[in-house]
Amino acid sequence: MENMTTNKSILSWINEKVELVKPDKIVWIDGSQEQIEALRAEACSTGEMIKLNQELLPDCYLHRTAVNDVARVEGRTFICAPSKEEAGPTNNWMDPAEAYEMLYAIAKDSYKGRTMYVIPYSMGPVGSKFSKIGIELTDSIYVVLNMVIMTRVGTDVLKALGDSEDWVRGLHCRCDIDEEKRYICQFPQDNTIISVNSGYGGNVLLGKKCFALRIASYQGKNEGWQAEHMLILGLQKPDGEIRYICAAFPSACGKTNLAMLIPPEGYYKNGYRVWCVGDDISWIRKGEDGRLYAINPENGFFGVAPGTNEKSNPNALASTRKGTIFTNVAHNLDNNTVWWEGLDKNPPANAIEWKGNPWNGQESEEKGAHPNSRFTAPAVNCPCISSEFENPDGVPISAIVFGGRRAKLAPLVYQSRDWNHGVFVGSIMASETTAAAAGAVGVVRRDPMAMLPFCGYNMADYWQHWINIGAGLEADKAPKIFNVNWFRKDDDGNFLWPGFGDNLRVLDWIIDRCEGKVDAVETSIGFVPKAEDINLEGIEDEVSDAQLKEILSVDNALWADEIAGIEEFYGKFDRLPETLKSELETLKANIQ
Ligand code: GTP
Ligand code: SPV
Ligand code: MN
């Protein structure tokens, strides 16, 4: 096949990799419909993908990954910076020369008998000043078809790049899907990613976590912008004006759900709407007016399937009704559609579960879908996609929200006193682990800014970068910073807050705070709503006044324990910013 570019840096890099992995042939992905159709057909002919009911789910496909390959593998993810210090205490580190040698030994000849697909893609609208270009080489059609949904792929991208050498190199090799030889390696100084022995999501769709967070966070530090694990939503108030909020929650902690929220009935009637700009990643930079602006660098949603239903997230569900790839969900053989836990109360009796075995959902104790099963859906499918989704200048940010899963401790919402206190609030985030990463589920761990698995350099320097960004903003233009917790539980383990659409009640308070329209109670940790300022109209039966007071309460004794955890975590960092040290001292003094 003919080369799609004359860019010398691209052609020589590809030649090098061809020598290494030895593909039978090379196919450039131009993003055309004909090519996509041909690849879908080929994947179906080999069993790599299953074509679903085209009347009910047009252009939708099902894919099952290997049973040992169903989530990101944080223990096998490395930041290959020149020194361990540059990767910092929260990242796995490997010396770049050693890493290349090891990875090349694994990748050697691994495309023999296979095709090399060359995917030129843009993170962000092609040509936007926010956007960055990457090339991913892969031997997986599943990866190609996912990248076509998740990013902007094709000839335009190469045209926009021209002869530039400023693009991110990504090599993916499926190899044998051997977990002992699985490595996801980022080389931030070389703009390079190498991923071997996986075929799953975040491990292999290299534009997503590997580039748009790990590599991009490092680029952002050097270039004065930020790459964050944040959704972006527009909250439209009855006056018709739309304010934008970025929110960082750890994996599987509610970003997709919040980004596509449908307001409770009373709010909806009054004209409240939520518009989705992005559900996972934000690239943020200062605009000419001195405010911070954000884009979503992605073009689709790689969303958690279980729990997605007509009630919890109708917009996400609608997004998956065409042109979607489902990964590791159950296959309903009666009508050739898909099913997952929490879709409805009627699991199929005649089905294949995510591992590929026959499954009777009416009788089986086993799950039909893996807890981290996902849909890859085009953003344009989303009924509430923002009109600003393609805006190359991004949207202006009014509020930044941090959050996680905390059964106790963190109140429903609180506001930081100022930017630096907000950075502190982000830095002390902790959350119970989920199925989005391999390993134990439900264990509380520190996950600063929801970036623990995604920061491409020393987390202490990343915090300093946050502080520097704030220092470059005029106080009245800086977004206000908040923390939320939808996951507080009572002593019997029941959620105290209904969550999902009702989270709008909290967003409404947040925007009112940004605009100085509502008072608050100052506590040891920041500003908490007065109970009467959280509107419970329509959910009085679900949330009693006493319950609301409980989830808004700040327990100084619990916070005293928390401080010990924060000190232990901070103790890992040699380069902890002075600002955060003094914020911690302030919190300690406030708690006493
Ligand atoms: P990643 O794609 O992994 O980054 O996840 P995410 O942050 O987008 O999480 P998502 O919105 O997919 O939510 C994951 C799970 O959290 C869902 O299956 C829901 O069950 C649950 N969830 C989301 N929002 C809420 C909420 O407001 N309350 C409760 N109790 N659960 C929620
Ligand atoms: C996450 O784990 O935060 C995800 C899914 O969004 S993955 O792309 O696999 O990282
Ligand atoms: Mn995510």
Image (cartoon, helix red, strand yellow):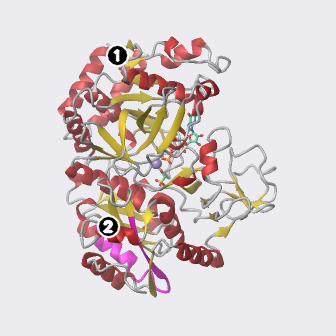
Magenta segment includes 112: yes
- Badge 1 marks a residue whose secondary structure is loop
Mark 2 touches mark 1? (CB < 8 Å): no
What residue does disc 1 label? 524
x, y percent for residue 202: 46, 58
**Position above or below: 492 against 200:** above
- Badge 2 marks a residue whose secondary structure is helix
Which part of the image, by quadrant, shows the C terminus?
top left
Which amino acid, by three-letter code, is at mark 2? Ala
x, y percent for residue 218: 26, 53
What residue does disc 2 label? 160
Image: magenta residue range: 99-121
**Position above or below: 431 against 147:** above
Asked if the residue at label 1 sits under 8 Å from ligand 1, the reply is no
Residue ID at (58%, 55%): 375
Mark 2 surroundings: few (<14), some (14-19) or many (≥20) residues within 10 A:
some
